[in-house]
Image: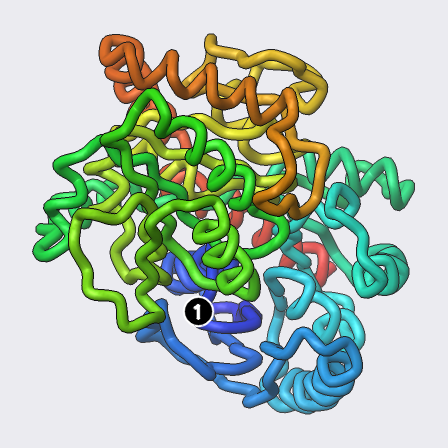
């Protein structure tokens, strides 16, 4: 009889964390009796055909009091479910799942950590959450913590004084074959935009992603590259702020959330969340990530799999491990690093910057670097080839094998 495994995800929508949880549930179902527990299926971007339970607890609100109330509510629901189902092991993905998993009890818990919480910009809510995080991840009812990058693992060991044997790294699984297949779909009405040189970024429109830097950089980049376009895929709480900034910069801006008529005369295209980003990524000149911090950086692997050259900030975790895994102290670089599977750039040091603020040295460096890359197709083709090869290192099967070995060891210990 197969062992009963529960995998908890906050949603079936939004981002890479949820997709990783679903891929894991699908693949591990080949070995275990897997139930996917979802806090709230308010919206579904990623379909799951296996056994699933919806707790119907909304965690989408960012109001700290409402969110805390609903987390407490989810704890009671999850505790009841654990008693009813008698799972042999429970794996939770991300803070919104990890917190109720730990508080609902049991000692057969594995927590997957997707965010470098201690590298994040700290607002009042973030500082409060960090205090809770310190308690949660020091709990004795955790069998193992799994981080999605070595940078997160090292950060948690340092900040929480953890035993190194209690925390390990397993990178996110990526179905590279599926990415390549989806990349061949037609662009239809959007195809005319990609007759131009397109710079593309993909991810939630949120503080962590720093897309305002890209808008400011793009404005000056167009001075000597008038035919380039900027395509932004994703949705999030910063969308109105970013659209306003784009307009304030004097960029002709298309937004999928407005009544704008689509054509190829715009400078910037806010396309929202799209079910198949790969067909847009594959037709782009460059994939750009301006994140202030990351957990892993799924979109980098996705872009590489599509053969699109990548340039990214050297965050404290994630991107630098993908792009240049042998580079030490990547987050301390002060100049572009070209000798990896893509280009790494120094991290930005500011939070949101408005249109009326002059470009700083970091932004000027990005402009020079992007101009250099856009003018050299041979270099871009080389990064394309190298990126395709690197994407293969994050295939689903070997990474799921790592998860299975970890689960098997947890189950053996629970039976001893």
Which sits in the foreground, 364 or 77? Answer: 364
Circle 1: element type: loop
What residue sits 60% from the left and 29% below the top? Answer: 359
What residue sits 62% from the left and 70% below the top? Answer: 88
The picture quadrant where one finds residue 363 is top right
What residue sits 52% from the left and 48% below the top? Answer: 403
Residue 174, how many percent across, how many down? Answer: 38, 44
Instruction: Reply above or below: 95 against 53.
Output: above
Q: Residues within 10 Å of mark 1 (few under 14, many from 20)?
A: some
Instruction: Reply above or below: 180 against 240.
Output: above
Could you tell me if residue 1 is visible in this image? no
What residue sits 76% from the left and 73% below the top? Answer: 106
Q: From the viewer's perspective, is 384 left or right of 154?
A: left
Could you tell me if residue 179 is visible in this image? yes
Residue 210, how many percent across, how many down? Answer: 58, 44
The picture quadrant where one finds residue 129 is bottom right
**Residue receiving disc 1:** 13
- Quarter holding the C terminus is bottom right
Colour scheme shown: rainbow
Instruction: Reply above or below: 21 against 2.
Output: above
Which sits in the foreground, 22 or 344? Answer: 344
Residue 158, how many percent across, how many down? Answer: 86, 36
């Amino acid at each position: 009889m197969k062992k009963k495994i529960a995998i908890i995800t906050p949603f079936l929508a939004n981002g890479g964390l949820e997709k990783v949880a679903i891929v894991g549930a699908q693949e591990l179902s080949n070995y275990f009796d897997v139930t996917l527990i979802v806090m709230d299926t308010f919206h579904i971007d990623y379909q799951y055909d296996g056994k699933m339970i919806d707790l119907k607890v909304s965690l989408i609100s960012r109001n700290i009091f409402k969110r805390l109330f609903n987390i407490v509510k989810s704890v009671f629901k999850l505790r009841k479910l654990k008693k009813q189902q008698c799972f042999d092991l429970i794996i939770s993905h991300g803070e919104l799942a990890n917190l109720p998993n730990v508080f609902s009890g049991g000692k057969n818990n594995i927590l997957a950590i997707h965010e470098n919480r201690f590298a994040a910009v700290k607002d009042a809510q973030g500082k409060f959450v960090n205090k809770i995080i310190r308690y949660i991840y020091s709990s004795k009812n955790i069998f193992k913590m799994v981080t999605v990058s070595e940078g997160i693992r090292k950060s948690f060991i340092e900040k929480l004084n953890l035993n190194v044997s209690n925390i390990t790294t397993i990178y996110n699984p990526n179905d590279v074959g599926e990415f390549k297949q989806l990349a061949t779909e037609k662009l239809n009405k959007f195809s005319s935009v990609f007759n131009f040189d397109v710079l593309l970024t993909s991810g939630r429109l949120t503080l962590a992603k720093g897309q305002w830097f890209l808008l400011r950089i793009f404005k000056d980049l167009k001075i000597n590259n008038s035919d380039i376009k900027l395509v932004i895929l994703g949705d999030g709480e910063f969308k109105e702020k970013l659209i306003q900034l784009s307009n304030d910069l004097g960029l002709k801006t298309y937004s999928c959330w407005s009544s704008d008529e689509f054509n190829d005369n715009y400078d910037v295209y806010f396309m929202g969340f799209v079910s198949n980003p790969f067909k847009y990524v594959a037709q782009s000149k460059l994939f750009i990530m301006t994140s202030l911090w990351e957990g892993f950086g799924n979109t980098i692997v996705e872009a590489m799999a599509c053969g699109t050259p990548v340039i990214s900030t050297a965050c404290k975790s994630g991107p630098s491990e993908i792009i240049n895994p042998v580079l030490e102290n990547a987050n301390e670089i002060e100049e572009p690093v070209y000798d990896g599977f893509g280009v790494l750039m120094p991290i930005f040091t500011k939070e949101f910057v408005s249109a009326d603020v002059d470009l700083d040295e970091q932004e000027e460096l990005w402009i020079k670097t992007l101009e250099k890359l856009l003018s050299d197709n041979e270099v871009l083709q080389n990064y394309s080839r190298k990126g395709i090869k690197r994407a293969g290192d994050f295939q689903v099967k070997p990474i799921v094998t790592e998860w299975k070995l970890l689960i098997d060891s947890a189950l053996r210990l629970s039976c001893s």
